[in-house]
Image: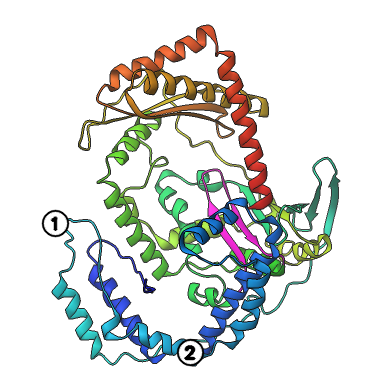
Amino acid sequence: MRPVDAAVIGSAGGEALVAAEALVTEINARRHGFTETELQRSRNELLNLYAWLYNERDNTASRSYADEYLRHYLTGEAIPSIELVFGLVQELLPQITLEEVNDKAAILADDDNRLLYITGPRKEETPLPSEDDLAAVVAALETAGIPPYVDSAVSDDLIETLPQPAAIVDETELPDLGVTALTLENGVHVLLKPTDFKDDEIVFNAVSPGGSSLYPDEDFPNASTIDDVVNESGVGDFTQTDLAKALAGKTVTVTPYIRELTEGFDGSAAPADLETLFQLVHLYFTAPRADEAAFEAFRAKQRTALVNRAQDPNAALQDALYAALYGDTIRRGPLTVEAIDTLDLARGFEIYQDRFADAGDFTFTFTGSFDMDEIKSLAQTYLGTLPAAGRVETWQDVAPDLPEGVIKEDVLKGEGDRSVVQMIFSGPLEPSREAELRLNAVAGVLDIVLREKLREELGGVYSSSAYAFIQDAPKPGYFVAIALGTDPRADELVDAVFEQIADLQDNGPSAVNVEKVMAQQASRARCSLNRTATG
């Protein structure tokens, strides 16, 4: 079978021709060839990938081996060891020349070697382009004299002048947890837990109380979306494109967030790139960006997603569920197109800067394969020097009160003789590990009896599930959810659900089902531990 190379681009509704023009322009520009700096970045990224696979060779998941063996059996794909592959990559990658790459690019961009096609929903308001429309785009760009791409150089240094390290004012060992707790001069708390689950990964998160709850409803759309814009805008003096160039060949991610009750970061890095992670965090505090182009791209993407969502019957069910649980509030469920249209970049960026103006109440947690002395030094340099204003904050309870009694809503949407049922049970509950285990056991038993009754005995559901979770804040409580995909006998099957719940309340679960649930929970615990150890 002849190998196929593909380039894919997405667009908002009604802008398929614009996307096609951008794609063909890029392909035509590549007839001039790639640049040496682009080739070097690609080398770095490939070498970094195979170095990671090599370093984690003792932690490879069994599933990866099984997939390789399957492809070997079905297609004859070779299955060399990662030691052999990494050695070949190190030997052969530097030998790939720019001329060879550009020869390949010329073949791919040849007029007789391309298929341009568009897929998308059939809508009267945004019809897809015709074959003639696409041909006209291609023909116009063939004679447009598109110049070669110019690859601008970027600095490898995210921060040119490093801050002077701050002092560690307190260091405490927590031996039962294997954690070292630091307090830095500016009040930042750092929790360090070295692990040997993976040899080439460090994960971290940072959290501070507050979030979007500290802003009124009219500010909620800006507060809940600005983190996405900042994350797509680059940082410091680096645009998003420049930042991608600077990070080529590195294994590092840092993502700022603003949630309802907290703001902070999630991320990870290879040990060799740990300083880059700390630099990114420092810059997201001290020199964030919110670019107009990223803002408009985010809005366009959200508009398209919301318009498409409106065509989905399941979305109508989710909207009805949100309305029944939380009433008329902008803080639950997806934003509307109208809310997206009223987003204000300047106001959103003010909120972001306010949330990250004071690092003194942030707690950073690092776990993974790191050297303790090195990570302490990095924390002193990049976290201990973050701005701290001494603010004392906590989140505000802006969550709508859950309704009392029974609420039933019917949603008539979609086609075919099929119903979807969602049932939510909630109430107050003090969170604890024991309460969580007991609640999950209840949901597990319920899942078994519903499957046996509704699917195997009554034959009325295509699928059924029951699950539970505990909410710590803002109001401690529990939720038990039941979901059914049924035939048109939805009311009869809902009555059967309540009969099973009443039977469990009156008689308790059978010993057989309790044993099944205990075995399931033990299996999940083992799988979770294995995933932690192997990634």
Measured along the vertical axis of the image, is residue 150 above or below residue 351? Answer: below
Which of discs 2 and 1 lies nearer the camera? The answer is 2
Quadrant the N terminus occupies: bottom left
Q: Name the residue at 37% across, 57% down.
A: 343
**Label 2–label 1 contact, CB within 8 A:** no
Q: Which of these two is toward me, 360 or 5? A: 5
- The amino acid type, in three-letter code, at marker 1 is Glu
Q: Which of these two is toward me, 196 or 25? A: 196
Instruction: Answer yes or no: is residue 430 visible.
Output: no
User: Would you say 56 lies left or right of 472 here?
Assistant: right
Q: Name the residue at 76% across, 52% down.
A: 195
Q: Position of residue 444 (x, y in %)?
A: 53, 25
Secondary structure beneath dot 2 equals: helix
Measured along the vertical axis of the image, is residue 182 above or below residue 56? Answer: above
Q: Position of residue 295 (x, y in %)?
A: 40, 64
Q: Position of residue 387 (x, y in %)?
A: 67, 62
Q: Please give the label number shown on residue 100.
A: 2
Q: Quadrant of residue 511?
A: top right
> Magenta residues, as a range?
247-271
Q: Which of these two is toward me, 433 or 491? A: 491
Q: Name the residue at 20% across, 37% down.
A: 415
Instruction: Answer yes or no: is residue 406 visible.
Output: yes
Q: Main secondary structure of the magenta part?
A: strand
Q: Please give the label number shown on residue 124.
A: 1
